[in-house]
Amino acid sequence: MQDVQNRVAAVTGAASGIGLGIVRALTGAGVHVAMLDIEERALSGARAAFETANVDVQPFVCDVSDRRQVQDVAAAVRDHYGRVDIVCNNAGVAAGGPIDETSEDDWDWVLGVNLEGVVNGMRAYVPIIKAGGRGGHVVNTASILGLWTGPRMSIYAASKYAVVAISESAREDLAPHDIGVSALCPGMIDTRILKSARNRPAAFAKQSSGMVEGDEREEIERRFATEGLDPNVVGEQVLDGIRKNKPFIFTHAALAEGIRERTERILGCFDGVEV
Ligand SMILES: NC(=O)c1ccc[n+]([C@@H]2O[C@H](COP(=O)([O-])OP(=O)(O)OC[C@H]3O[C@@H](n4cnc5c(N)ncnc54)[C@H](O)[C@@H]3O)[C@@H](O)[C@H]2O)c1
């Protein structure tokens, strides 16, 4: 979608981090944006920065894991703007621990937001984009951990591998309708993702020990803050990915090496029968 001016986008997880970076880039390019987030106060604070924007930026409280609410909010967004052309299914949370120590609540919470949230978003917005008849674009936020993984990451990586798979399959489904689909696969970005328990519903209280060991946590937090990429840069990368209809949007060139190593490991196991 080369010409994004005056198009309409819905962005989930828009009150913070990458989502907010995406909103900045889109509004800067003349896109009207519905900002969706579960955190009402953070959302109204974030939206205030766009008071004087030349485009229509509206906040909508929406829990992406709530299928019914996602459908209702999508209808409200369509009614307000008259159309939707772009959806960025970006809201996400992180939790984990060694597989045998993971809690049911972590699985339910993380898969509910990261995986079902993307499914809910696509099922709600793709029909609206199709009905507009002018094509469109979907960006699903996965992670570089949607393409390779490590210890303590089973829950988060399972959700993100699934987002990559959904995006690749949907890209084929939607190409005939001139709707592009990109999987956004960020590396380390300076956001509040390590504090995602702030949005954890009381119903999912039982936490596993974490994606990093207790004594490494401070060091990881420090690295995210000092070495993590600015989410506004990611926003511009997403805008570029939409314009060029990229199947994958990567944030860090050096991470290609990890993908190469994993692919070689997979290919090295191809000793099955010849048919
Ligand atoms: N920060 C990184 O290094 C990194 C790397 C790879 C992928 N990601 C992914 O990027 C996405 C954005 O995360 P971020 O890093 O900007 O973190 P963040 O915590 O700064 O922002 C996430 C936003 O999602 C919202 N949110 C959480 N649960 C929600 C729900 N149920 N419904 C609606 N909104 C909800 C939060 O309120 C928050 O505003 C996530 O999908 C995350 O998994 C982040």
Image: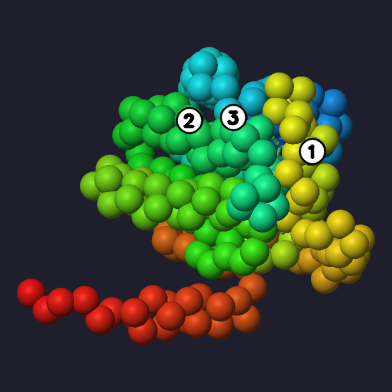
Residue 120: assigned label: 2
Residue 267 falls left or right of residue 111: left
Point out the residue furthest to the front here.
100
In the depicted view, which residue is nearer to us: 12 or 214? 214
Residue 190 against residue 27 in the figure, above or below: below
Circle 1 Cα neighbour tier, 10 Å, few/some/many (<14 / 14–19 / ≥20): some
Q: Nearer the viewer, mark 3 or mark 1?
A: 1
Q: Amino acid at mark 3?
A: Val
Q: Position of residue 254 (x, y in %)?
A: 62, 81
In the rendered structure, the answer to whether residue 239 lies left or right of residue 262 reads: right
Q: What residue is shown with label 1? A: 197
Q: Are marks 3 and 2 in contact (CB under 8 Å)?
A: yes
Q: Secondary structure at mark 2?
A: helix
User: Label 1 to label 2, Cα distance in Å?
Assistant: 21 Å
Q: Residues within 10 Å of mark 2 (few under 14, many from 20)?
A: many
Residue 86 showing in the rendered view: yes
Cβ atoms under marks 1 and 2 closer than 8 Å: no
Name the residue at 48% across, 30% down.
120
Q: Going from the N terminus, do you reach mark 3 or mark 1 first?
A: 3
Q: Position of residue 214 (x, y in %)?
A: 86, 57
Image point (45%, 35%), residue name: 119
Considering the image in quadrants, where does the C terminus appear? bottom left
| Residue located at (25% from left, 81% from top) | 271
Observer-nearest of 117 and 54? 117
What kind of residue is marked 2? Asn
- The structure residue drawn at horizontal position 86% and vertical position 64%, both measured from the top left corner, is 216
**Mark 3 to mark 2 CA distance (whole Å):** 7 Å
The vertical placement of 249 against 163, above or below, is below
Above or below, 138 relative to 211: above
Sequence-first disc among 3 and 2: 3
Q: Is mark 3 within 8 Å of ligand 1?
A: yes
